[in-house]
Amino acid sequence: MSDDESTDINESDEPAAVGVKLGSTRTVLDIPDGRGGRERHSILTCLATYEDAITGEEKVLFGEEAAVEYPDTVRFMLRSGLPEDEESVADAERFFEAVVDAHDVPEESAVVYAVPTIDNEEGVENLTSVIEGSSIGQIEARSFPESLCGSIPAYGDGLDAIDEVFLSVNMGSTTLEACAYRRGEQLSPFSTGSVTGNEVDRWIVAAVEEESQGRVHIDRTTAREYKEEHADVGDFEPFTDVVQQPGGGSHEFTVDRGVRDPVDRYIDDAVDAVANEFLPGLANDHMKPYQLALGRPIAVTGGMACIPGLTEEFEARLSDALDRDIEVVSPDDPATAAAEGAARIAERLI
Ligand SMILES: Nc1ncnc2c1ncn2[C@@H]1O[C@H](COP(=O)(O)OP(=O)(O)OP(=O)(O)O)[C@@H](O)[C@H]1O
Ligand SMILES: [Mg+2]
């Protein structure tokens, strides 16, 4: 008997545990790899449609391929964080179905999905309907807060975060979320749309234009790529890129402060939001848990926490702002941690 056959038998014995995060920039799936382990996939949350050259049928393309091949018509349907209107709900449904289909996610599965902490009931309901209306999750489908899911791998290999009192900060594309958790319960959830990865991308567009004395105007996708590839808080290396001039020829330019300054400002803004907006509210409403949680490591998650050195700098500046030693813990991969934590909850449910 081959290995393949034996894993097939194992798989049919037990429903699959699936972790999902449908994010505005990327969607992450944490699924069984069919060999007794697990694998994680990160996919750009976008789709494009085209006509099949032979049958004329409308076909769906998603992720990187859609973004690169159809830059003019590609739709990032969760740009604002959640599916807002009928059209983006329909796009999100097609996108999600195409993604689970392409990755052979079993229908017989327990699905746990991460939801942002945001004051947008309709948007959250739409997200729920996209996932619970999909073909997967026939055993069970449940949602948990994204920042709780992301904190689970920050606190070790198990589900320790679920039974703890701790603070969590989630640094995403469209929001910065902060929340205290008391054994899974949210205390004083806070969310701001003004300290975000998308905002940093906009600042990079402006800063690169300034650094090049108006000669270089990049789009926001390029700005995001600069940030994801080059941003580094302790160890930034200036880099060069080339733009084609409209009249022919090309222009080479160097980016230094164009990426450094926006990231620096982001850290200051994040510290300001946590120290001066979130924490005072928490202290006011829940004094004892606040004191307890501040003495423990703060879980910092979300894609922006992937920037090398960012969490260390956040830790140092937050300690300064609060005039006490703050410790930060981060998962190995902050951008996919929410799906990983969700999958661990799903395993427990099974
Ligand atoms: N390796 C990386 N380096 C730098 N930035 C990154 C990296 N990976 C992701 N990011 C940035 O993190 C942000 C996405 O984070 P995350 O996936 O947590 O957001 P999201 O959950 O989709 O957004 P939100 O919840 O705010 O709607 C984007 O701004 C993205 O550019
Ligand atoms: Mg998020």
Image (cartoon, helix red, strand yellow):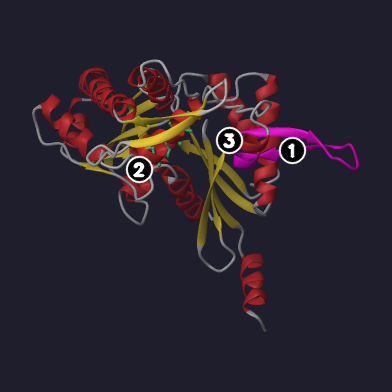
From this viewpoint, is residue 180 visible? yes
- Mark 3 and mark 1 in contact? Answer it, CB < 8 Å: no
Q: Please identify the residue farthest to the left as the structure is shown.
A: 323
User: Horizontal placement of 204 versus 84: left or right?
Assistant: left
- Mark 2 and mark 3 in contact? Answer it, CB < 8 Å: no
- Residue 131 image point, x, y percent: 62, 37
Task: Indicate whether residue 48 is drawn in magenta.
Answer: yes
The residue under the point 14% across, 25% down is 321
Q: CA distance from mark 2 to mark 1?
A: 34 Å
From this viewpoint, is residue 21 visible? no
Above or below residue 160? Residue 178 is above
In the foreground, 31 or 45? 45
Q: Which residue is mark 1?
A: 60
Give the residue type at disc 1.
Val
User: Horizontal placement of 98 versus 64: left or right?
Assistant: right
Q: Earlier in the sequence, mark 2 or mark 3?
A: 3
Q: CA distance from mark 2 to mark 3?
A: 22 Å
User: Horizontal placement of 91 versus 182: left or right?
Assistant: right
| Residue 57 quadrant | top right
| Viewer-side label of 2, 3 | 3
Q: Is mark 3 within 8 Å of ligand 1?
A: yes
- Mark 2 and mark 1 in contact? Answer it, CB < 8 Å: no
| Disc number for residue 151 | 2
Q: Which residue is mark 3?
A: 45
Give the residue type at disc 3.
Thr
| Magenta span | 46-65
Above or below residue 266? Residue 27 is below
- Residue 206 image point, x, y percent: 39, 18
Above or below residue 142? Residue 86 is above
